[in-house]
Image (cartoon, rainbow, N blue to C red):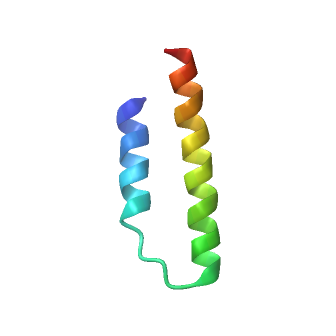
């Protein structure tokens, strides 16, 4: 599970953002991943 999240976060950091809509998408994905991480932290 952690490897999957780490991979998703790394992919997110490597994205080339060239428009406002891409930035909005990036922010949405970042919030979703952070929520998943917080949920896992509460589990362990």
Q: Quadrant of residue 30?
A: bottom right
Above-or-below relation of 14 to 39: below
**Residue 32 place in picture, x, y as percent:** 62, 47
What number of labels is visible? Answer: 0
Above-or-below relation of 21 to 32: below
Q: Quadrant of residue 42?
A: top right
Image point (57%, 36%), residue name: 36
Which quadrant does the N terminus fall into?
top left
Image point (48%, 78%), residue name: 17
- Left or right of 40, for residue 32: right
**Residue 2 place in picture, x, y as percent:** 39, 31
Q: Quadrant of residue 5?
A: top left
- Left or right of 12, for residue 35: right
**Residue 44 place in picture, x, y as percent:** 49, 15
Give the residue at the far top of this rendering. Answer: 44
Above-or-below relation of 20 to 15: below
**Residue 40 place in picture, x, y as percent:** 53, 25
- Left or right of 1, for residue 36: right
Above-or-below relation of 6 to 22: above
Image point (58%, 73%), residue name: 23
Image point (55%, 45%), residue name: 33
């Amino acid at each position: 599970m952690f490897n999957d999240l780490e991979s998703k976060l790394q992919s997110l950091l490597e994205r080339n953002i060239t428009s406002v809509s891409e930035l909005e998408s990036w922010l949405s994905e970042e919030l979703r991943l952070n929520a998943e991480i917080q949920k896992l932290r509460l589990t362990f």
